[in-house]
Amino acid sequence: MDLSYSDEQVMLRDSAERFVAANCGADNLRKMRASEEGFSRAYWKQMAELGWLALPFTEDQGGLGGTAVDTNVLMEAFGRGLLLEPYLTTVVMGGGALKAAGGRDDLIGKIIEGDLLLAVAYAEPQARFDLFDVATTARKDGSGWVIDGHKAVVLHGDSADKIIVSARTSGDRRGKDGISLFIIDRGAAGLERRAYPTVDGSRAAELFFNSVKVGADALQGGEGQGLAILEKVSDDAITALCAEAVGAMKVLLDTTVEYTKTREQFGQPIAKFQVLRHRMADMMMEYEQAKSMALVAALKVDSADPVERRKAVSGAKVQIGKSGRFVGQQAVQLHGGMGMTDELSVGHYFKRLTMIDILFGNVDHHLKQFSAAA
Amino acid sequence: MDLSFTPEEIAFQNEVRAWMAANFPADLRAKVETGEKLYKADLLRWQKILAAKGWIAPAWPVEHGGPGWTPTQRYIYANEMALAGAPDLPAFGLKMVGPVIYTYGNEEQKRRFLPRILGGEDWWCQGYSEPGSGSDLASLKTKAVSDGDDYIVNGSKIWTTGAHDSDWIFCLVRTDDTGKKQDGISFLLIDMKTPGIEVSPIIVINGDHTVNQVFFTDVRAPKKNLIGKENEGWTYAKFLLVNERNGIAQVGHKKHTLRRIRKLASATDMHGGRLADEPGYRQRLAETEVALMALEYSELRFLSGQKTDHAPGTEANMMKVAATQLQQSMSELFIEIAGYYSFPYDGFRDKKGSNEPPVGPAEAGGAMFDFLYGRAATIYGGSNEIQRDVIAKVLLSI
Ligand SMILES: Cc1cc2nc3c(=O)[nH]c(=O)nc-3n(C[C@H](O)[C@H](O)[C@H](O)COP(=O)(O)OP(=O)(O)OC[C@H]3O[C@@H](n4cnc5c(N)ncnc54)[C@H](O)[C@@H]3O)c2cc1C
Ligand SMILES: Cc1cc2nc3c(=O)[nH]c(=O)nc-3n(C[C@H](O)[C@H](O)[C@H](O)COP(=O)(O)OP(=O)(O)OC[C@H]3O[C@@H](n4cnc5c(N)ncnc54)[C@H](O)[C@@H]3O)c2cc1C
């Protein structure tokens, strides 16, 4: 067994860490959240030049053939830096969906060049975390389709050039069969968008499909084949988010240790108080367990054994949810009033961790998935 | 021993209920039910209605404008108000400095300040914490130096809630730094319009502006606004802190919030069913309700004069810890209901004349906003670590 990074992975980590240290962090977030799209197109181009947008795609597709562990190396650094660019939505989710569906290597090429942004519209207001709960419909119309429905909280749904949307081509709202994926241009007639900022300083949109007409080629991966692709996309995204959360927790732990060593009350550094020392020891232990589980997810998300994959991915999401909550909340607590400010970075990491806990299903949801798989 | 209310108490409860139904403005109620932010103008309107009725300061002595209720009546009143969705008015005047003034102030101070606190003409803020003095409050350094009939005040206060909306600030200032740190502190009232005071906003984690840093540069504060004796301010400060913690259980508000949570969790169509039927959620909801009962009956026990067996005098500290933990776990239950719809940043939920609906279900509005701000509850008013220290000190007699 060897759980150490390869030389390439070490290089990837170092370059990603240099990039976020130079460009990202809370100051950048405060600046960007006031901007039109909430992230920097210039950074996105640089990320393309660094080859990061090519990482998970096959060499045939013009990619680097990276593994889930490679993606996690990047995501952990992004988590440390509160990186805002739409890597998760465009590369991991959108690119992942195209890769799984097959047939659109032209679009993957554009992702790699940094010329195409994607968003995946899977959630619906009534669906909570169930990917198969799809009320949006796609009805046959000549050789093409007509799509109607409302997709909720589509991450980066405002800036994406194309949207990949799940819609029902047959069956009941909660039926596991009959879900298909379509790719749609942002400017399609009948596609309405209500964009808004999110709590963590990013962007999302409600998307309303009002009889949006698409051609036969919009269908991705075959009629009724959408759910399996969505489940893969969701698992890859969870795996990536777990690594991002680990990066965020590491920063919170380091920042808190540093702060309590310098902040003095009662004539001594507050790090001298045993209750705070134990709290930080607990934070560290939570961080380490989270890191282990994020690694398990990355190593097993592509496993052919569905039970093994489910337990690794859902198990990691449970651990990350619990650890992230503890580390985030205690980091704020140990900073006292300072932890509550928009000025310090602590609150931004805490908010991001809170959102990661909810994204693609919270602790309860994944405990259920885990026990159902066991 | 009797848990039930007397017929007179029940009549009183009905009276409060009926009056609320008739007099609590519907637009304020709607704002509370959807988690919208209430501004000073909203609160002031409500304060004037309560003041006109004579119900604005339940705990104040009759001679200063209180209604003369028994502790049980006060309890019933607070409960009914909260259950009807009435917002809390800022405590700084009505629950903090008001009682300090009628307990330790002179006649002139009582005449001058108390009626204006009741009527809302003066809004107050609390100038205790400083950048270098949070948990270790007694180490405060803002200096007041005697100069004829005045003090000249220099220094800075931080985390001052509502300073930007306030007419007056009650400050702990250092008037002597030769002895023990608690011994050289004075309790001084300062008009916020005095030259040399600068209020600088601090934006908090949910994007709101509630707290400030307040800078004092050669601020001239008349000595007639000193409470009690010079260098004895620590006594008054601690009296106020105990009052602050007493109100902190907020049982009525918690019941109101829990009712909202239960209603939403029972109604929302999630997972093809109700969230309240999900085993994990259901169990946490029940646990929360049990914790709220324990809090409520502890408050009633302490109100009725029972003391703790082990650490008498620490009842308020215990209530602070238990109540804030409960508040935080309730707000977690709330964002769980909202699910993905806790992501949209809804700013101050101040529609400012726009009739665009909030993103997501309106009833779950403000869930994330309150969850984030609620993290402060275990920090302010003496952090929970400090409360436990206080309890342990008494428990172990050290
Ligand atoms: C079942 C069992 C098997 C054992 N087997 C062995 C053995 O094989 N060989 C051997 O040598 N010993 C053995 N021990 C002894 C064991 O190592 C000691 O009990 C242990 O080190 C604690 O010491 P103590 O019992 O004197 O408790 P104390 O040291 O008096 O501790 C009492 C309590 O105070 C806490 N405490 C102490 N210091 C601090 C501090 N600085 N900060 C915070 N909390 C503190 C402790 O955590 C504990 O809760 C065994 C004990 C048990 C219970
Ligand atoms: C939203 C908000 C509103 C506020 N409003 C007001 C206001 O209106 N007026 C006002 O005067 N103040 C106000 N405060 C200030 C509040 O009272 C202080 O934040 C609080 O006393 C903690 O002080 P600090 O922030 O300096 O943290 P610190 O004292 O630096 O504490 C940092 C951490 O160390 C811990 N710690 C400190 N000492 C010990 C110890 N001996 N043992 C164990 N742990 C310890 C604390 O519990 C905390 O977790 C407000 C604060 C907030 C966040």
Image (cartoon, coloured by chain):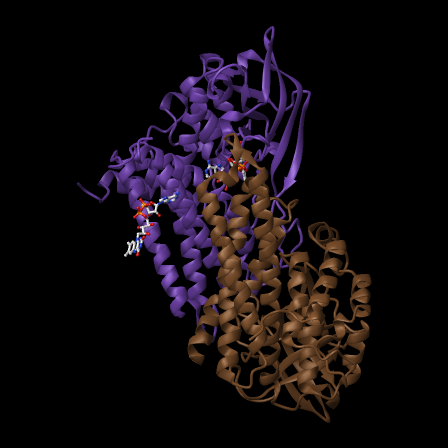
Chain colours: A brown, B purple
Q: Position of residue A63 (x, y in %)?
A: 76, 79
Residue under the image location 57 percent in, 65 percent down? B340
Asked if residue B374 is positioned above or below residue A171 in the image, the reply reads above
- Residue A16 place in picture, x, y as percent: 72, 63
Report the side of A106 relative to A234 (left or right). Answer: right
Q: Is residue A231 above or below residue A141?
A: above
Q: Nearer the viewer, residue A56 or B350?
A: A56
Quadrant in which the N terminus of chain B appears: top left
Count the numbered circles shown.
0
Residue A31 seen from this side: yes
Residue furthest to the left in view is B1
Residue farthest along the top direction in this orientation: B148
Q: Determine which quarter of the picture holds residue B247.
A: top left
Residue B337 position within the rendered picture, expressed as x and y whole percent measured from the top left:
49, 63
Q: Residue at x 52, y 24 (%)?
A: B116
Q: Nearer the viewer, residue B38 or A230?
A: A230
Residue at 31% across / 36% down in the picture?
B73
Would you say residue B247 is visible in this rendering?
no
The residue at 57%/25% (across/down) is B168
- The answer to which of B56 and B129 lies nearer the viewer is B129
Image height of B53 relative to A192, above or below:
above
Q: Position of residue B335 (x, y in %)?
A: 51, 59
Is B257 situated above or below A297?
above
